[in-house]
Image (cartoon, rainbow, N blue to C red):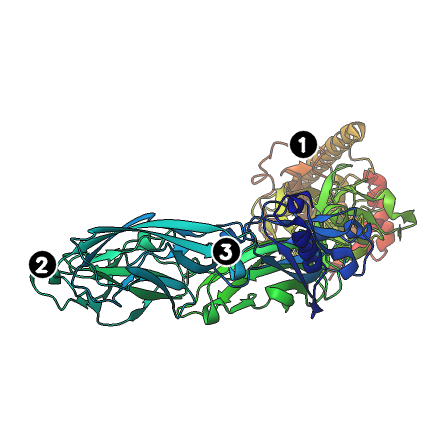
Amino acid sequence: MAAVLKLPNRGRLVLLCLLLATLWEAGAGQMRYSVPEEIEKGSFVGNIAKDLGLEPQELAESGVRIVSRGRTQLFALNPRSGSLVTAGRIDREELCAQSARCLLSFNILREDKLSIYSVEVEITDINDNAPRFVVEELELKISETTMPGFRIPLKSSHDADVGENTLQRYELNSNDHFSLDVRNGKDGNKYPELVLERALDREEEAVHHLVLVALDGGDPVRSGTSRIRVMVLDANDNAPVFTQPEYHVNVPENTPVGTRILTVTATDADEGYNAQVAYFLEKNPEETSEVFELKSSSGEITITKSLDYEDAKFHEIDIEAQDGPGLLTRMKVIVTVLDVNDNPPEFYMTSATSSVPEDSPPGTIIALFNVHDRDSGQNAFITCSLPENLPFKLERSVDNYHRLVTTRVLDREQFSVYNITVIAKDGGNPSLSTDAHILLQVTDINDNPPTFPHTSYSAYIPENNPRGASIFSIMAHDPDSDDNAHVTYNLAEDIIQGAPLSSYISINSDSGILYALRSFDYEQFHELQLWVTAHDSGNPPLSSSVSLSIFVLDQNDNVPEILYPALPTDGSTGVELAPRSAEPGYLVTKVVAVDRDSGQNAWLSYRLLKASEPGLFAVGLHTGEVRTARALLDRDALKQSLVVAVQDHGQPPLSATVTLTVAVADSIPEALADLGSIRTSADPDDSGLTLYLVVAVAAVSCVFLAFVIVLLALRLRRWHTSHLLQTSAGGLAGVPASQFVGVDGVRAFLQAYSHEAWLTADSRGSHVIFPQPNYADTLISQESCEKKDFLSEPQLIPEDKEETFSQVNSLRNIPVSYFAKRNKFT
């Protein structure tokens, strides 16, 4: 209030200030105050706390603050008193110029409730400006022929104040020829005119000096002075006259600089030099003279500076028309600036949040902002909108304030960040718009369990795997973030073949990699079924499970197992029988084998690895059937030894062998004659027994050789002594057939043993090759040349087969029980 006391008539001004400051209106959330200009900084304007229903100390707690739209703030809130005070010097003329009322509007925000209140402060005028003439010294020229009553317009005075404080009257000093008349214009201004009261006489007085005083209505009264010098001329008694008393023109604010907007015209009834009219702009303290240019000779008015409707809605141009001798006429041109839509809307963000939890309820306030357009009318009508398909909406508040709120619950896994574009568009044509961007982060909550890409998984591991080997990797994805997305893995407990699952498989809890804790055997089990559970680290944690099937793949780790022929348990050697009359393709026997592996590792193939008579027998590749490859010949040995290999198709392949003994004979006795060469030892590696068998075979050969010599000697004796022969014949007739074998039989037997003799029943034994003697010339007879089957002669087969077998076995010490059980004779 110290500044108020310094003013003239301090008591009245202080009383006026207090009265105006206590008057305010509150309607629809609006507060009105009044304060005089030029009061001291910090002066009281109004009690905001009281008008808001708050105590002074509650202003700061409620977040009450002034919100303006970018202009210099002239007011402030006193937090101690809760009052609205001035924040600096307030000059009404600077703010509102000549406006009748000077109103300043701003908003007050209450942040705790996000409420907006409109405040309007009227700045009242004080008499701080005196009337001022633009031209302090004016020279007028008047013809002496001018008749009394002639009026000469004078330069008017300008007072920046308004109301009673503005220009009220003019006064002219006392003189004999002139008087002052003041004309009130349509715009409310006062225009002084000098009136000639008495005819002038240049010879009496050529120059008249006048003083024009302009007075305002303030207290105290302020004044301005202009000195007028009147020059008396001859003959020119007519002043220029404009065609219109006042010109009006409408100009859009976007009219280019240099455009001619109007041409004024004035005529003078005089002739010659006295009728030459020139036009001049009347200088004034406003910027109008800088915006327009007047051509003195033609009266054309052009634009020299861009117009702006937002700065000035109209311009007044005072134009003077002066003839050659100096008579002038003044006229006013009113230029109305038309608004065009040249200002886009402007955003003023009051409050905004940068993040919001994804479980926030619908209606959560994200931002509060204000939108303003400097244009007017329809061009200032603003509509705000959001892009479609966003979970937000705008709610309009007072004074173009808007709230951005959510319309539904947000989902961070769908959209973690929203770049919200708010579009403000005015109503102009064409329309202008402004975008404001609000970046909103959606914070995560643990609302999603880990998920596996598949409903079930299968893994394959070869058997005999090393312990600790990685067998499979499984991964779950959690769409949450941070700890809510950190996944750990574990296996569900189970029992497999009496042992816990954890003794077979382990899993890395962080990476989801499964490891084998033992070596698996396909022949033990083919498949493991287990459940993998994934947990996140949220609070509370969420989990999900998936099934995993681990299949053990077979490896070729088992050799084929031969089921037939099986090695006898009594130590004997199995013998297969092939009749001499067998045709090619005759099925002798079949090797049967199995493989404990599976698939290709269990596919078996058979081949003849070794044979005593190559080309005589063939083995089926896939069946294992042993068949004759050709017809049997007399020269073929009675005993054939075959080594058959059984091999699987694994990588690498594994194989097993079996040795087959095939007796080539049509009957059992013929087969028995050759059984001495079969080794019956249960131990195939017994080399000592092999030696004994070699000695036994040699001894038997010697006995047969001696027997042949004896027979030859008997033949010779028969030839020489017929009686002796008859006696020998009678003696031989009484010999049993089981104890005597004919020459042809001996020859056939010797021929059989003159070939390669196998002494062992398997491929790991050794064999002996005897030289093959030629008995072609030993016995030359018709009977000896005939082919006879030793086993096919029924008269040579003893009635007591067991006795014959015993005699032969006692001779060769070779058991034949296994042979007798496995062969059929015809």
Q: Which circle marks residue 295 in the picture?
A: none
Q: In the image, what residue type sits under mark 3?
A: Asp
Determine whether, in the image, residue 780 is placed left or right of residue 146: right
Q: Quadrant of residue 188?
A: bottom left
Residue under label 3: 161
> Which of labels 2 and 3 is toward the front?
2
Gap in Å between the C-alphas at discs 1 and 2? 167 Å
> Which of labels 1 and 2 is toward the front?
2
Circle 3 — which element? loop
Which of 383 and 725 lies nearest the eye of the viewer? 383
- Closer to the N terminus: mark 1 or mark 2? 2
Q: Position of residue 251 (x, y in %)?
A: 32, 66
- Residue contact at pointers 3 and 1, CB within 8 angstroms: no
Which of 422 and 496 lies nearest the eye of the viewer? 422
Gap in Å between the C-alphas at discs 3 and 1? 151 Å
Packing grade of label 2 (10 A; few <14, some 14-19, many >=20) is few
Figure check: 745 above or below 295: above
- Closer to the N terminus: mark 3 or mark 1? 3
Packing grade of label 1 (10 A; few <14, some 14-19, many >=20) is few
Q: Residue at x 46, y 55 (%)?
A: 215
Residue under label 2: 273
Circle 1 — which element? strand
- Residue contact at pointers 1 and 2, CB within 8 angstroms: no
Q: In the image, what residue type sits under mark 1?
A: Val
Q: In the image, what residue type sits under mark 2?
A: Tyr
Q: Which circle marks residue 768 in the picture?
A: 1
- Closer to the N terminus: mark 2 or mark 3? 3
